Amino acid sequence: MLKRDEEIVEHAKKKTDLILQRLAEQQHDPDPELLRKMKWTKDDLKDFVNRWDEMKKRAESGDEKSARKYERHLKSLNLRPKNQRNSVKQNQGDIRGLNQDGGVTKPSDDLLPDYNSFMKDLNRVRDN
């Protein structure tokens, strides 16, 4: 793995651990605003935390396939160190005529549940 990729994965691990710790602390009394924004129930929150915890434990157990899966999930979060995010923005600004980001769009609210379901299924297929 490239040094840059290692830095990205390590950064994503640290951020993910902090977020999961905070979510785990809220499992019994979750923030209603968080549940509303995520369109989750209390059980969904608990399942999410448990899924990530299990994935991390399997990755740390020495199972290479599980470690690759966990690393792939971490990379998919696109959590980059601040210095790498800035360099990407700077490089994108140098491209003339391509400053608009037309390739990345968010599904409309009415399509979001179907899109999320599709992405979960897609990730399940990739993981197997």
Image (tube, rainbow, N blue to C red):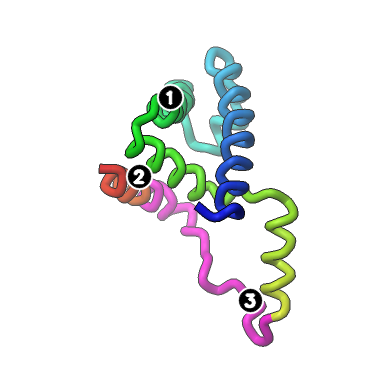
Q: Name the residue type under label 1.
A: Lys
| Circle 2 SS class | helix
Q: Which mark is residue 120?
A: 2
User: Mark 2 packing: few (<14 Cα in 10 Å), some, or many (20+)?
Assistant: few
Of the residues shown, which amino acid type is indicated by label 2?
Answer: Lys
**Between 15 and 42, the one nearer to me in the picture:** 15
Say which residue appears at 48% left-offset and 50% top-offset. 76
In the drawing, what numbered circle is on residue 57? 1
- Decide: few, some or many residues near mark 1? Use Cα within 10 Å; few <14, some 14-19, many ≥20: some
C-alpha distance separating marks 2 and 3: 28 Å
- The stretch in magenta equals 95-116
**Camera-nearest label, 2 or 1:** 1
Task: Kindly state the secondary structure of the residue where label 1 is placed.
Answer: helix
Badge 3: few (under 14), some or many (20 or more) residues near its Cα, within 10 Å? few
The answer to whether 78 is drawn above or below residue 56 in the figure is below
Q: Work out whether 51 lies above or below 113.
A: above
Badge 3 element: loop
Residue wearing tag 3: 100
Query: Disc 3 to disc 1, how far (Cα)?
Result: 40 Å
Q: For the residues carrying marks 3 and 1, which lies nearer the camera in this image?
A: 1
**Dot 3 amino acid type:** Gln
Residue 58 image offset from top left, x and y in percent: 38, 27
| Image mark for residue 80 | none
Q: In the image, 82: left or right of 111?
A: right
Q: Quadrant of residue 50?
A: top left
Of label 3 and label 1, which has the lower sequence position? Answer: 1
Farthest-out residue, bottom: 97
